[in-house]
Amino acid sequence: MGLFLQMSMVLVMMASLQGWLPLGCLEEERIALFLLKDSLNYPNGTSLPSWRKEHADCCSWESIECSSSTGRVTKLYLGSKRNQELGDWYFNASFFLPFQQLNTLYLWDNRIAGLVENKDFINLKNLKLLDLSLNTLDNSIFRTIRTITSLKTLYLRSCRLDGQIRTTLGLCDLNHLQELDMSDNDLSGVLPSCLANLTSLQQLYLSSNHLKIPISLSPLYNLSKLKSFDGSRNEIYAEEDDHNLSPKFQLESLSLSGRGQSAGGFPKFLYYQVNLQYVGLTNIQIKGEFPNWLIENNTYLQELYFENCSLSGPFLLPKNSHVNLSFLSISMNYLQGQIPSEIGVSLPGLKVLLMSDNGFNGSIPSSLGNISSLQVLDLSNNVWTGRILSNNNLQGQIPGWIGNMSSLEFLDLSGNNFSGPLPPRFGTSSKLRYVYLSRNKLQGPIAMTFYDSSEIFALDLSHNNLTGRIPEWIERLSNLRFLLLSYNNLEGEIPIQLCSLDQLNLIDLSHNHLSGNILSWMISTHPFPQQYNSYDYVSSSQQSFEFTMKNISLLYRGSIIRYFTGIDFSCNNFTGEIPLEIGNLSKLKVLNLSHNSLTGPIPPTFSNLKEIESLDLSYNKLDGEIPPQLTELFLLDVFSVAHNNLFGKTPARVAQFATFDESCYKDNPFLCGEPLPKICGATMPPSPTPTSMNNEDNGGFMDMEVFYLSFGVAYIMVLLVIGAVLYINPYWRQAWFHFIEVSINNCYYFLVDNLPILSKFGFL
């Protein structure tokens, strides 16, 4: 009996609970959702397939969250739901009126171009977050948004907003706003003074516009809660009246980058900041010494960028050790002198150190080797000289302790004056992936040992004085993507082991003394590996190399190089025929085999190089006809087969080949057709055969123009010599004229005696 009463009470309680627990979203919200779906998919879209009438509980539909207590819709995640091919969307804001408890609304990337009948969101009194980014809006959207006074977060990134931010638009009426993002638009003019009314604002992002932002940030001084400000890629200027007032805010993150304008000295408000964790000032002509006081005042500072800021003088360290700074970039300035020897002690937590493109001299301080966390080290394009390690007489050499930095992932010492041999080993650098030592004066053979050869992605030793052969151990670099050994004094044949590197995207062996045959080659089609953290991204973005493309030597930098594929074997002593397999490298963009002694025909498989942009086979001994299928290379921009022994007709003047002039084919004596002046016809000589293989310039063929010229000169010289002899010596002159007289008489009597005989046979 007692058990029966307990079960009855449980059933009654469950029934009573079911009476007030929500069974699903409200009918009025359900109807509004269907209207919203139809509008979003107009005229024939298929988004939000789970929103169906037979499913009564709309809280279980995709992209929707409801309150567990009331059953009302609280969050709508409708970002990028409209098919882009459907065109612009003019949505009706009245659809959202039933959603009285809606607090989060994502509508980004839906091609919203405006509102129907300019309806507003006046009934959305609980809306806290609104994201309209990546749409096509105008400034009238502010008048609609101003009615949502409850907003705390507003995203308007990449909305094509333009013009000035006027006070009358109503943006400054949102006095509960905590985060505002209007980056990547076309906004212009000065910052409105009414921004001071947004006293709850904590994060303000205005990057990538055309705004005029004072480096003093004076319009924001009243925002006491402001923590983050991003005004990068705008016009940064110095105010005539620099404010002595201290700001009410204490920033944690500051990013300002201009377009090269002068901004005077460091803004005074920076002297009052003590909570900064991130500072990025780039492309602003500040003109001053390195602000070591900024590091001293902000003990939590983690990342500091001063790139292209016209900083000058010595590089000054903070007075005390700063353990939190992990990222320091002072590239592209005018800093001079030596790097302080105690840098490794003062900044022991560095993971990334970028000091390229300055005027530093002296030696690399050995204390850098004590920074066990250092992953990226870029000291390129400076003037490094002097003694590196005083006890080892390694003057001008790259210090050996660099190979003992266990966390080092990216090393760039290019563009300096290092001399001597390459670092012999990277014994403990287990994470090393990028090694750039180009444009130095390094000598000797390529003798390097890596802790884990399979981790090396890029090896650039170009523009040095290296000698010897390409080592066979290079096959152990199984994941190598970029190999640049150009402009050295390497000799010998290409080792067969090099051809096993099937991950290569680019190889440059040009301007050496290499010989032998060009081997069959592989160019990787594998996608580039993903970056796993921010420092992987930095390593990738810092990559740079010099490569000749379209007859121009350019410096390629950053993420673009991951899409770059090329082979440059020019200016060597290679012989033999071009391997047919090279024509199967369909992703190849650059192929330069010029200035060698290659023979044989141009492989017809080259028509498979559908992505080729530059093809240079000039200054070789190639023969045969130019494959007519090459006209199918529609991306080809540079083409040259000049100075060879090719014959036959030039390719048809169609597509890209209609743009190539005579210089692309010149000095092929038996080649004819446009754009060459020689016209192809029935009297064309047969296919030539070489008469001599000793002529390196023309492959052994006789130049007929030179022959005729030399014959005429010799004939004239003989006549002049005979005339001079007869003029000087009277005896020989008398004998010559006597000989002429006797010859004429003999011819006369010969004709007289034989005329009757010729007449008898009908010749006269």
Image (tube, rainbow, N blue to C red):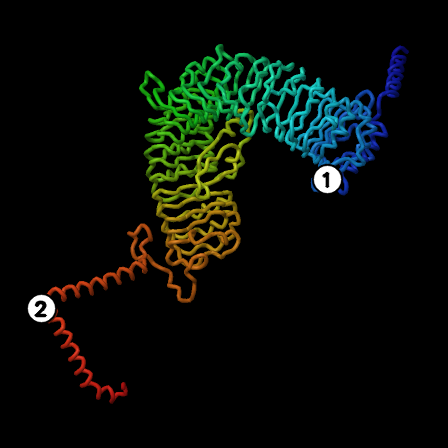
- Regarding residue 253, the answer to whether it shows in the image is yes
Q: Which residue is mark 2?
A: 731
One can see residue 375 in this view: no
Answer left or right for 234 relative to 477.
right
Q: Badge 1 is on which residue? A: 88
Q: Position of residue 384 (x, y in %)?
A: 38, 24
Measuring 33% from the left and 36% from the top, which residue is drawn there? 489
Could you tell me which secondary element the residue under label 2 belongs to?
helix
**Quadrant of the image for the N terminus?**
top right
Residue 641 on image: x %, y %:
41, 51
Residue type at the position of mark 1:
Asp
Find the residue positioned furthest to the left. 731
Q: Nearer the viewer, residue 500 or 710?
A: 710
Q: Residues within 10 Å of mark 1 (few under 14, many from 20)?
A: some
Q: Residue furthest front?
A: 240
**Gap in angstroms between the C-alphas marked 2 and 1:** 108 Å
Q: Which mark is residue 164?
A: none
State the residue in front, 118 or 680: 118
Foreground residue among 93 and 490? 93
On the image, which quarter does residue 220 sit in? top right
Q: Mark 2 or 1, which is nearer the eye?
A: 2
Which residue is nearer to you in this view: 356 or 719? Answer: 719
Which image quarter: residue 467? Answer: top left
**Residue 164 picture quarter:** top right
